[in-house]
Image (spheres, rainbow, N blue to C red):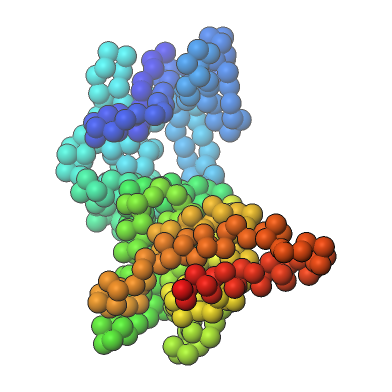
Amino acid sequence: MKIYLVGGAIRDRLLGFSIHDRDWLVVGSTPQQMLKKKYQQVGRDFPVFIHPITHEEYALARTEKKHGVGHSGFLFNFSPTITLKDDLIRRDLTINALAQDRSGKIIDLFNGQQDIKKRVLRHISSSFTDDPLRVLRVARFAATLSHLGFYIAKETLMLMTVICERKELLYLTPERIWKETYKGLCSRNPQVYFQVLHQCNALLYVFPEIRFFFRETNFINVQDNYINVLQYSLMELSRISKITKDVDIRFSYFLQFMSCIFFTSIVQINNNFFYKEPIILIKNLCTRLKIPKETQNFLIFLCGFHHFLQNLEYQSSELIINFFNSIDVWRKPKRLKKLIYLRHYYYNNNQKNSLPVLGKLLQSMFLSIKNISVNSFKNKNLFHGIAIKYELYRLRVNALNKWRYK
């Protein structure tokens, strides 16, 4: 029995990253032998074992054969005769197929170290196309490593396109799609994740709503300076990702611009409090991928109120209080904190310089009414039931008006 450290831990160490998880590969053993050594087996489809002391994962070397569709349509062979090369060749990228023996020697059978030096993401063999999840994984690696100059090899991108043409992405479970997307959104350059998926036509199958946005994107005329909304949305995702790691903020600040593909006139925008058309797409996306509820809510708020917020200075105090009520800021103030990074998008530079930062303006407005409660009533006994709600609303509107027009 031989044990090797494999995959991401070696890649990350060569790139100078800190190592959080280590995966181990066991060659020449059987489940029975592992259990005798007090390893605890997890998973029924293929033997993975937990070390009795370190609690790290040890997987038996295996081969796999395509048998069906999707990410799970494989037949596995865990014979003790499976070699290290047999196991490594089934992996996705050369940089993930590195192994290290007990003496610390790196075993590189597919030029992974060379590709790390060249900064290229390259598939190992034609069996790359057997697993549709690899399209998302490679897009995620591209987003994670793009700041180091990594790019996807032309041949690998072609194979990713082939996988998409076969429509096998349709067989991926919502959980797996969201898991990879979440990791992509956590990466240093999450905009690259969506750009790569667009390049190989994967958006059609995993994010048709975002593909619709990419295809139907508009140019907005800001005093004869036309803004490409799609390009702007990707730039905003890039900008916000340099400020915060919060996935709710990153995803919603990117998708808020979907509201721009539906409007027909500036009058229509200014007269819309909550814009319902793009929310149909947002809800479809969130429901299909089983996106967490709070992430869904924030996406819906920011996209639906996008035009309202962009014209905040011209909104009535009544509508602004209605907005605070709609996002339930009284019970969930963290939602307002997530809006702190908002800025004006559709003004020329001279106008932007004369306007307060949108997120901070929202915060200031809220602070001016934050402390108004039932205790603010001159005579609490005069109000009961729904009348309390209306009186709170009136006091908050008056306080906000005083703050705005003092």
Residue occupying the point 24% across, 19% down: 105
In this rendering, the answer to whether 321 lies above or below 128 is below
Residue occupying the point 28% across, 39% down: 94
Horizontal and vertical percent position of residue 106: 25, 23
Is any atom of residue 297 visible in this view? no
| 315 or 245: nearer the viewer | 315
Is any atom of residue 380 visible in this view? yes
| 332 or 132: nearer the viewer | 332
Residue occupying the point 45% across, 49% down: 246
| 209 or 318: nearer the viewer | 318
| 322 or 306: nearer the viewer | 322
> What is the quadrant of residue 275 in the picture?
bottom right
Residue occupying the point 26% across, 87% down: 224
Horizontal and vertical percent position of residue 61: 44, 26
In this rendering, the answer to whether 25 lies above or below 255 is above
> What is the quadrant of residue 113 in the picture?
top left
> What is the quadrant of residue 116 in the picture?
top left
Horizontal and vertical percent position of residue 300: 56, 66
| Left or right: 320 as drawn, with respect to 213 | right
Which corner quadrant holds the N terminus? top left
| Left or right: 72 as drawn, with respect to 144 | right
